[in-house]
Image: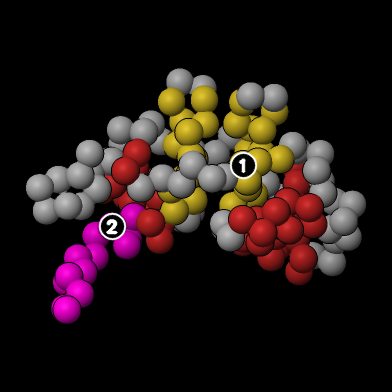
């Protein structure tokens, strides 16, 4: 729910539910291509119904710089295992603090053990910027 000023109060208000998900054995190149197609900066790595890891743009860049063949290298070689996650009622401020403290830009939103979406640092930052209404 948004506060009276119209700003989001929790990650539920900001999270993207359109997420890229893949398995730990999928090739980095396939995951990266899916991220590009969906215009997102991360892919959630699922082991069955459970979140096993996250692969981000930075991870793909590091993998590419390593000289690895990204068409055969599995995402499990480059993903962050057991990533931090947030409940959907986590405040925007707490999510931003967690992400800044740990140095990551994508935070899976999980309720129980079910992935509900992803919130990015960009989403959190954009929610804090007040924009004047366009003039007619």
Q: Name the residue under label 1.
A: 44
Q: How far apart are marks 1 and 2 (CA)?
A: 23 Å
Up-down: is 133 above or below 10?
below
User: Within 10 angstroms of label 2, few (less than 14), some, or many (20 or more) residues?
Assistant: some
Residue 80 horizontal side relative to residue 126, left or right:
right
Up-down: is 36 above or below 21?
below
Q: Name the residue under label 2.
A: 127
- Per the rendered image, the range of residues in magenta is 124-136
| Number of the label disc, if any, that sits on residue 98 | none
Q: Hey, which quadrant is residue 65 in on the image?
A: bottom right
Q: Residue at x 78, y 52 (%)?
A: 30
For the residues bearing labels 1 and 2, Cβ distance under 8 angstroms: no
Residue 31 horizontal side relative to residue 136, left or right:
right
Q: Which residue is drawn at 63% across and 46% down?
A: 20
Residue 78 horizontal side relative to residue 103, left or right:
right
Residue 49 horizontal side relative to residue 63, left or right:
left
Residue 101 in the magenta stretch? The answer is no
Up-down: is 33 above or below 25?
below
Q: In the displayed orientation, state which residue is furthest to the front.
A: 136
Q: In the image shown, does 34 or 85 lie closer to the viewer?
A: 34
Q: Which residue is drawn at 62% across and 41% down?
A: 44
Q: Quadrant of the C terminus?
A: bottom left
Q: Hey, which quadrant is residue 132 in on the image?
A: bottom left
Residue 135 in the magenta stretch? The answer is yes
User: Within 10 angstroms of label 1, few (less than 14), some, or many (20 or more) residues?
Assistant: many
Q: Position of residue 96 (x, y in %)?
A: 33, 51
Q: In the displayed orientation, state which residue is furthest to the top.
A: 112
């Amino acid at each position: 729910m948004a506060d009276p000023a119209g700003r989001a109060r929790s990650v539920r208000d900001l999270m993207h539910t359109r997420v890229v998900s893949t398995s730990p054995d999928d090739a980095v190149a396939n995951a990266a291509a899916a991220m590009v197609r969906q215009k997102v900066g991360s892919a959630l790595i699922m082991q069955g119904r459970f979140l096993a890891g996250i692969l981000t743009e930075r991870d793909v860049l590091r993998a590419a710089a390593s000289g690895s063949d990204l068409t055969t290298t599995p995402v499990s070689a480059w993903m962050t295992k057991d990533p931090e996650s947030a409940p959907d009622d986590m405040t925007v401020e707490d999510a931003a603090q967690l992400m800044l403290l740990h140095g990551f830009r994508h935070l899976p939103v999980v309720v129980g053990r079910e992935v509900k979406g992803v919130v990015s640092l960009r989403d959190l930052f954009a929610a804090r910027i007040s924009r004047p209404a366009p003039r007619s």
